[in-house]
Image (spheres, grey):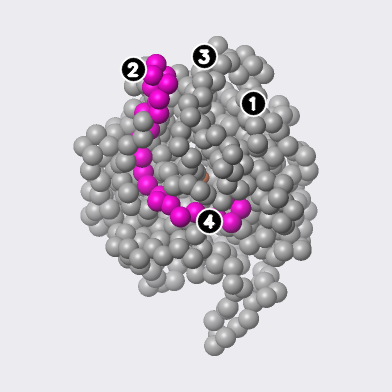
Amino acid sequence: MMLGKGSESKGGIAMPDQNPFLAGSFAPVEEEITAFGLPVTGTLPPDLNGCYLRNGPNPMGLEDPGARWGDGHWFLGSGMVHGVRLRDGRAEWYRNRWVRSRQVSTALGEKWPGGPTHDDADFAANTHIIRHAGRVLATVEAGPLPYQLTDDLATVGPYDFDGKLPGGYAAHTKLDRRTGELHAIAYYWAWDYVQHIVVDGAGRLSRTANIPAPDGPMMHDFALTDRYVVLFDLPVTFSMDAVAAGRKLPYTWNAAHQARVGLLPRAGQHPGQPGAVRWFEVEPCWVFHTLNAYDDGDRVVVDLVRYGAPYDVSTLDGKGPLTLERWTIDPGRGTVSPRGLDDRAQEFPRVDDRIVGQPHRYGSSAVIGEVSRGTMSLSGDFADGAFANALLKHDLAAGTNEAHEFGRDATAGEAVFAPASAGAGEDDGYVLAFIHNPDRGAADLVVLAAQDFTGEPVARVHLPARIPLGFHGSWMPDE
Ligand SMILES: [Fe+2]
C-alpha cells in the first residue's frame, strides 16, 4: 500500500506532513486486514450476535492529485469501514475495507464496480454505515450517493434506491422503528432547498420533498419525533469565496444567515410537497449532531451537542464552548429554550437506536481530546485532560452522568448501544466502542455493561491493527 510522497523517516518513525489529520490518532492505516478468531479479555456476552461496523476517513493520497490527502480536511478522506463480527461469545472476525469509489478502485488496481452517480460526485462514502431493509449502506452528505457493501464489507457499488433518489443522500438518517420509515435530509451546494427523503420499511424510496433553504446551508444531522422532522438551518453555508480560496469543503460561517430550527410535520406530506415548515429563530451557533428528540405534549424536546458561534467547517475552526444541551421548542409560544445538560467538550451523542424519535432517558457521548482539538480549533488548548478520552453515559431523567475514562493515550471513539436482546429495555445492554490500546499499539473493541458503566469492561476484543479516529457506526444484530 502506498505511503504519502511527503513522508519522511526519522529514526525509523514515519513523519507525516504537518497536516494533523495524518498524524497520531488520525493517521490512516495502510493495509486491509482480515483476521479470524480474535483474542478476547473478559467474556463476550453469548447473546451478542451481530456485527459492529464503523466508518471513517482513511485518505489514500489520491483524493485530489493537486492537493494530496484530500485537501488535508479530515472530512474528505476516502471512507474505510472497520467491522467486528460477534457470535456465540466469540469474536469471529475483524475486517477493514476501503469503500470502492472509482478513484479508490483505480488506486488499488481494481475494476470499479460501477453504478450511478449524482452530478458526477462519486466519493468513497466515509461518514456513517447503516443497515436498512437488509441493505448495508456507507453514507456521506453534500452530493454523492451512498455505497452498498456486503456483510463482509466488500463494495457492491453506489446505490440510488433503484433510480428513485433525485440527488445525493445524507450521512445521518433516522429510523422510526414503529413505522419502519428511514428519514434523511440531503443538501447540495447547487440547490436552493434541502431535500427530505423517506424510505419505507421494505427499502423503497417512498417520497421526497424539497424545503426552500437560502444560502446553501450545511445540514449534517437532524432529528425526528412522532410528529415532526426537526431541521437545523444554521449559519454554516456554502461559500464561493471559500471555493475561490481553494477550499475543498467550502462551508464557512455566514453571520448574515439567520440561525433557525424548523419543524416539518410528518403527517400529510405528499410527494414533492413539504407542507408547512414552521421556523423558529435561535441564537447563532453550530450543531453537528443531535442525541435524540421527542414530542412532549405540544412541545418538542431535542438534545444535541452545540458549538458556540462562530464555526467554520471549511477550516474546522471554532472557539466553543462545545456542550450538551436540551432545546425545548414550543410552537404555541414560538420559542426555543436551551438548557445546559453537560459542559464537558463532547461529541458523537447517541441514543439507543430503537427509541429514536421517542422519549429517551439515557444517552452516550464521547470525550475525545484529539477530536475536540481537531474540530474546534487546530491551535485550541484543551488543558483539562481529566476527561481527555472517556465515554459518557447521561441519565437525563436523574440529571446525572458517569464517565468511563480510558487514559490520555487510549483514544476513544463513538459509543453505540447494543441491547441485551431484542426485547430488552432502554438501558439493558452493552455499549460498544473502538478504543485505542496504547500497550499494543492497536485498537480494542471495548464492551461495557450499560448498567455498570464505570466498571471493568465485560470484554475487550483485541484487534490486529490500529483504527484511525473516525466517525459513526452501527450495531447490526443478527435478524
Ligand atoms: Fe456526524
**Residue reaching furthest bottom?**
11
Which of 329 and 161 lies nearest the eye of the viewer?
A: 329
CA gap, disc 1 to disc 3? 19 Å
Query: The residue tagged with tag 4: helix, strand or loop?
Result: strand
* CB contact under 8 Å: marks 2 and 3: no
Label 2, residues with CA under 10 Å away: few <14, some 14-19, many ≥20: few
Quadrant showing the N terminus: bottom right
Label 1 vs label 3, nearer the camera:
1
Q: Which mark is residue 317?
A: 4
Q: Residues within 10 Å of mark 3 (few under 14, many from 20)?
A: few
Q: Which residues are magenta?
A: 313-336
Measured from the top left, where is residue 265 in percent x and y?
51, 18
Which numbered disc covers residue 212? 1
Under mark 1, the amino acid is Pro
| Cα distance in 3D space between marks 4 and 2 | 38 Å
At 65% from the left and 51% from the top, the residue drawn is 249
Residue at point 23% right, 39% down? Answer: 399
Label 3: which secondary element: loop
Q: Earlier in the sequence, mark 4 or mark 2?
A: 2
Q: Earlier in the sequence, mark 2 or mark 3?
A: 3
- Determine which of the numbered discs, if any, sits on residue 111 in the image: none
Q: Do labels 3 and 4 touch, CB within 8 Å?
A: no
Query: In the image, residue 99 lies at what x, y percent?
Result: 64, 51
Residue 316: percent from left, percent from top? 55, 55
Label 2 sits on residue: 297
